[in-house]
Amino acid sequence: MVWIAARLELVAWTDRRAHPECMARSSSSSMHDHQTKITAVTRRDIFDYLGGGGGTWWGRLDEIAFLDGLYDLDALPSRDTRHPTARGDITQHRMNNCDWENDWIFEDSRFQLLEGPDEVLLAFLTRVVHPEVQPDVTGPPGRSMS
């Protein structure tokens, strides 16, 4: 029951479509002015939890569709010289080659989950539990409540 209540709070927050103001759609100075209160240890614990449940952070969507709801993947740079943008990187390494681990997103600095503003991580987590992504409301992503 606590899980459902927390999920509903997060979904309500997401439905305000906060990501244009707080997500990494640009490198505006306002992104760097936010104080980080969620510690690195807590962030790692969250990533370990999301990665250890047998489910996926992108739920029933594919990774591109999930991330498109939060980031402008065509504006983020590529780390692979064969592709101009993050969208190309993800497509190549997750869909074509399958040579990135499922938890690649947590360490990729372009997405600011490990060391970025709290709002970025909170928006990501809100999307993780959104009914569009995780339709099962009986428990955390990839986990049974029994």
Image (cartoon, rainbow, N blue to C red):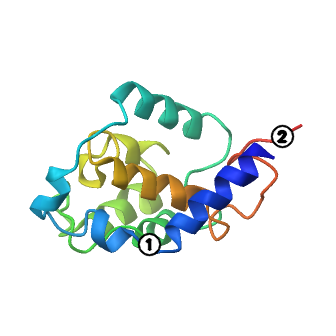
Figure check: 125 above or below 2:
below
Q: Amino acid at mark 2?
A: Met
The image position of residue 88, as x and y in percent, is 30, 68
x then y, percent, for residue 20: 32, 73
Q: Which residue is identified by label 2?
A: 145
Splitting the image into 4 quarters, where does residue 106 fall? top left
Question: SS for tag 2?
Answer: loop
The residue nearer to you, when weighing 99 against 130, is 130
Task: Look at the picture and state if 86 lies above or below 33.
Answer: below
Residue 2, visible in the rendered structure: yes
The answer to which of 33 and 96 lies nearer the viewer is 33
The structure residue drawn at horizontal position 44% and vertical position 68%, both measured from the top left corner, is: 64
Between 50 and 15, the residue placed more toward the observer is: 15
Task: Report how far apart the C-alphas of labels 2 and 1 lie in the structure.
Answer: 28 Å
10 Å crowding of disc 1: few (<14), some (14-19), many (20+): some
Res 100 seen here: no
Name the amino acid, label 1.
Gly
Residue 91 shown left or right of residue 73 in the figure: right
Q: Residue at x 44, y 29 (%)?
A: 42
Crowd class of label 2 (few under 14; some 14 to 19; many from 20; radius 10 Å): few
User: Which element type, helix, strand or loop, lies under badge 1?
Assistant: loop
Q: In which quarter of the view is residue 43 placed?
A: top left
Q: Is residue 29 left or right of residue 103?
A: left
In the picture provided, is 90 more to the left or to the right than 33?
Answer: right
| Residue drawn at point x = 56 percent, y = 56 percent | 128
Residue 35 lies, in percent from the top left, at: 23, 43
C-beta proximity under 8 Å, tags 2 and 1? no
Circle 1 sits on which residue?
69
x and y percentages locating residue 85 in the rendered image: 22, 68
